[in-house]
């Protein structure tokens, strides 16, 4: 994945990602996407290009457990969210809807407008603007599989459950 960075700070909650005034009015994910991050940056949707990244600090996605927040980000064309840490429910919702989320301790090395090249399987971010490499917390194979299928629903439709190598045995 390759794209430009749109940088945010700590504690970006789900109401900042998609305001309640929209998430309860429509089930149309493309309509929700037009309002992503609107309360923090009213022109955000107009500045992004398909494949861009959102980068943030700690506790990204705190707040509501509704999946509209990661869906709005995904349908806006953001290829992944990179943050120092994520709220647990947002993290799982993002994976479940097919939005890659990466934990990176070095997000302070990434600036607004930088161009990143991200390899999920290697767990590596290459900041092409600053010529630096950042490692990310690797995603488990089962999560990579879910992302490759575009989300948990697509994964289950295709595989009729989890593949045997992902089953937990006691």
Image (cartoon, rainbow, N blue to C red):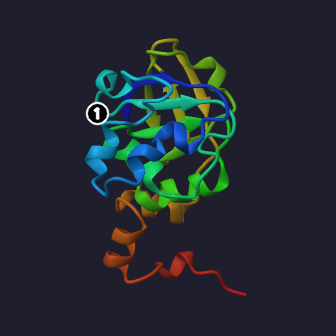
Q: Specify the quadrant of the image occupied by residue 42.
A: top left
Q: Is residue 62 above or below residue 3?
A: below
Position of the C terminus by quadrant: bottom right
Residue found farthest to the top: 130
**Residue that badge 1 annotates:** 50
Give whichever of 150, 165 is nearer the camera.
150
Q: Residue at x 30, y 36 (%)?
A: 34
Q: Is residue 87 left or right of residue 34?
A: right
List the single residue furthest toward the bottom. Answer: 170
106 to 168, vertically: above or below: above
Which quadrant is home to the N terminus? Answer: top left
Query: What percent of the width, then of the height, locates residue 61?
Result: 59, 44
Q: Is residue 25 above or below residue 17?
A: below
Observer-nearest of 125 and 50: 50
Residue furthest right as drawn: 170
| Total marks placed | 1
Where residue 159 sits in the image (x, y, percent)? 36, 79
- Quadrant in the picture for residue 111: top right
Classify 13 as above or below 113.
below
Crowd tier of the residue under label 1, counting other residues whose Cα lies within 10 Å: few below 14, some 14–19, many 20 or above: some
Left or right of 145, for residue 10: right
The residue lying toward the viewer, choosing from 138 and 64, is 64
Residue for point 52% across, 61% down: 143
At x 48%, y 78%, the residue is 162
Q: Position of residue 10 (x, y in %)?
A: 67, 30
* SS type, badge 1: loop
Residue 39 place in picture, x, y as percent:
48, 29
């Amino acid at each position: 994945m390759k794209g430009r960075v749109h940088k945010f700070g700590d504690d970006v909650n789900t109401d900042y990602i998609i305001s309640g005034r929209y998430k309860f009015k429509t089930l149309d994910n493309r309509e929700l996407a037009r309002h992503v991050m609107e309360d923090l940056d009213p022109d955000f949707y107009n500045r992004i290009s398909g494949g861009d990244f959102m980068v943030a600090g700690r506790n990204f996605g705190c707040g509501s457990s509704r999946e509209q927040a990661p869906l709005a980000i995904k349908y806006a064309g953001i290829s992944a969210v990179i943050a120092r840490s994520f709220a647990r429910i947002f993290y799982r919702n993002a994976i479940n809807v097919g939005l890659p989320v990466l934990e990176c301790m070095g997000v302070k090395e990434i600036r607004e407008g930088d161009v990143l090249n991200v390899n999920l399987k290697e767990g590596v971010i290459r900041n092409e603007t600053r010529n630096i490499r950042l490692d990310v917390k690797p995603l488990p194979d089962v999560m990579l599989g879910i992302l490759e299928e575009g989300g948990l629903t697509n994964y289950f439709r295709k595989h009729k459950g989890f593949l045997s190598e992902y089953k937990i045995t006691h």
